[in-house]
Amino acid sequence: MAEITLQTPLTEEMVRNLKLEDTVYINGHIYGIRDATQIRIFDEGVPPPTDLTGTVLLHTAPGVKKLPNGKFEKVCIGTTTSTRMNRFYPPLIKEYGVRAMVGKGGFLQDTVDKMKEYGAVYLAIVGGAAAIETTQIEEIEEVWWEDLMPECLWKFRVKNFGPLIVAIDAHGNSLYKQVKANAAEKMAAMKF
Amino acid sequence: MTTATATLYDTIEDVGKDLYIKALTDIPKDVRKALKGSHQAEVDAGNTTASKIMLTVLENVRLADEKSMMVCQDTGLPIYKVIVGSKFGGDLDLLEVKKRLKLGAERATKEYPLRSSTVHPITRKNTQTNSGQGIPVIKFDFNDSDKLEIWMAPKGSGSENMSFLRMLKPAEGMKAVKRFVIECVFESGANPCPPVIVGIGLGGTSDVAAAMAKEASVFRKVGTHSADPLVAQLENELLELVNQTGIGPQGLGGAQTAMAVNIEWAHTHISQLPVAVNMQCWRGERASAIIDADGNVTFGN
């Protein structure tokens, strides 16, 4: 359970070295995406308007304020449940070179297997802790696909973004799966 | 008894706005206490990851207080519960109250500004106002006071998506009820942001059960128990079983899967045993305001 600070962009080697329950902090950039963003990329076939190689993505739809100069000021940036968007992560890694997803709730087994094959991790943030998250995001640097507001593609500059727990590693291990297996065992022993 | 005036409706609109923002920025006292308890329980159990998560939760609540920030980004779907005292303004126009609360939610969205989370179910087009057809959800209830009480909850979606209804067989009894609740907690796993408040609606009809589950998860305070000793006992039993699953904070393992199990109940049909489950995430967001006969407002949560 090491504590590690990573600077973006990430390499395959960097993420392969992470172990379950390590705590990670990110410096550099994180890209925000959500349901509608990924539906546009994969179901409507529109390629992302920026290079995502080695990036860290975040499942979010931020609350923002548009300034007169066209830039966006953060109001509240938090994290949504990842499990809904399970099917999008494997192609994000394979076709666009993404190396880490920050979210809550985790992914399903098929995606865990693909993460092992392609070399990517899932970093669990503390869901609901948006005051901390918003504070650690220094600036919204770019926004693409504003018509999907708030489900645009966002580029955030972050400093010591975390704590993030390695909940699915790049070797096929999932903390969610372990916890669920343990819970199933406990339930089987329960007397109702 | 007071006479409802234009000023009163302006007050209600302001309260509708203020409650939405308050619920998102100021965690209720009972929930704060429970979160501290959950942190301590994880520390005592020696769960490193779970302790770290709960510490981050507490730090987040502190930061939100210090900087007057929102605790979580999910502006939810706004729910208002209005309790009209029978001795409060006999000529109170409830339709106008409904309109003003909707306006209040829209003003909060525009003026704060809050992210709009409200979309059309078919087109998925965002209204950008946190209002629309049937939204905000506005419920009316009545008591015999001389006050107008307004409760508000911006119900977050991570927890709301973890909602369940089962029409069990009377012959299966309480065993089936307990098993069903535990299965719901298991299926929900990390998604509703545990440690959660598990709201249960027991009895009634299917729709009543679902409404009671929401009342139990959102408006019942953590640490309170049902006035019925049988139901209170079931609450305690279920809380223990839920926490035995070890799902823990954020579903990453630990002793604290739930802070509370709250049950609201109603009588039901001889051949029915409806059970509804509704989860509330750890932020347990809610806020309240009491308007007296002179139009003075007292906020709480």
Image: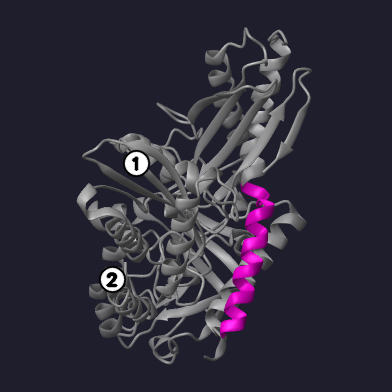
| Viewer-closest of B54 and B36 | B36
Left or right of residue A51, residue A72 in this image: right
Tell which residue pokes out farthest to the front in this image: B229
Residue A128's quadrant in the figure? bottom right
Residue at the (72%, 62%) spot, across then down:
B62
In the image, is residue B246 above or below residue B64?
A: below
- Residue B227 location (% of width, % of height): 54, 45
**What secondary structure characterizes most of the magenta part?**
helix
Residue A20's quadrant in the figure? bottom left
* Protein chain holding label 2: A
Mark yes or no: residue A144 visible: no
In the image, is residue B120 above or below residue A167?
A: above
Q: Mark 1: which secondary structure?
A: strand
Residue at the (57%, 31%) spot, across then down:
B105
Q: Which mark is residue B193?
A: none
Q: Which residues are magenta?
A: B24-45
- Do tag 1 and tag 2 residues touch (Cβ < 8 Å)? no
Taking the magenta stretch, the answer to whether it contains residue B182 is no
- Residue A106 location (% of width, % of height): 38, 70
Mark yes or no: residue B164 visible: yes
In the image, is residue B164 above or below residue B258?
A: above
Residue B174's quadrant in the figure? bottom left
- Residue B201 location (% of width, % of height): 39, 45
Mark pair 1, 2: CA separation: 34 Å
Left or right of residue B294, residue A33 in this image: left
Type of amino acid at the residue the image marks with label 1: Gly
Which residue in the structure is indicated by mark 2?
A: A108
The N terminus of chain B lies in which quarter of the figure? Answer: top right
Q: Mark 2: which secondary structure?
A: loop
Which residue in the structure is indicated by mark 1?
A: B203
